[in-house]
Image: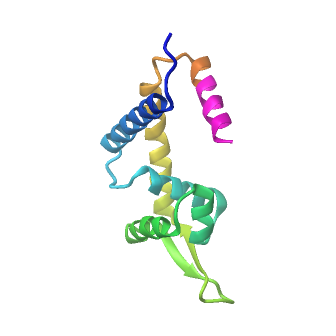
Amino acid sequence: MKEETIFDIIHNMDKFTNNLIIQWNKIFNEELGVSHILLLGHLASKGKSRPSDIAKVLGLTPPTVTHLSEKLVKKKLAVRSTDEEDRRIVYLSITEAGKEILQRANLEGQILRRNLFEKLTIEEQQQMLRIYQKLNE
């Protein structure tokens, strides 16, 4: 058996990830990408947050978080607020509409995951998740 190069591994992972994103965009017609949903998920679990903190946790740049949050605020899925003691500090919070979109995204994501991973047994799916988690540590 031929040993795969790092480039073969990257190519196959990218190909799968790109297919996953394409399928996601086909089923979720809200003009929101995966990064928008990740940001909403962060706000839902951690509460109001500073964009710089969100950037660190999600591994994004601060300008990317600013760009993503612009769309979320415009769609009324998130709101900006300032710190009462220091008005220079801005926070982002999820709205009820944002929570509803996040819930719908999670439900549709579960369906997509089941469809894409049906080739794998439950044990293989769990093993794959553990491997990705281990590699990301």
74 shown above or below 82:
above
The residue nearer to you, when weighing 99 against 119, is 119
What residue is rendered at 63% in x and 58% in y? 57
Residue 57 shown left or right of residue 22 in the figure: right
Residue 72 shown left or right of residue 58 in the figure: left
The residue nearer to you, when weighing 55 against 81, is 55
When asked about the image quadrant of residue 86, the answer is bottom right
119 shown above or below 7:
above
Q: Does residue 48 show up?
A: no
Q: Position of residue 74 (x, y in %)?
A: 38, 71
What residue is rendered at 56% in x and 69% in y? 93
Q: Is residue 132 magenta?
A: yes
Q: How is the image coloured?
A: rainbow
When asked about the image quadrant of residue 20, the answer is top left
Q: Position of residue 37 (x, y in %)?
A: 48, 53
The residue nearer to you, when weighing 66 against 95, is 66
Residue 116 shown left or right of residue 26 in the figure: right
What segment carries the magenta color? Answer: 126-137
Main SS of residues in magenta? helix
What residue is rendered at 48% in x and 60% in y? 98
104 shown above or below 69:
above
Residue 14 shown left or right of residue 38 in the figure: left
Q: Does residue 122 show up?
A: yes
Q: Is residue 119 magenta?
A: no
Q: Quadrant of the C terminus?
A: top right
What residue is rendered at 63% in x and 41% in y? 136
Q: Position of residue 34 (x, y in %)?
A: 44, 50
Looking at this view, name the residue that lies furthest to the top.
1
- Give the mark count: 0
Q: Position of residue 52 (x, y in %)?
A: 59, 70
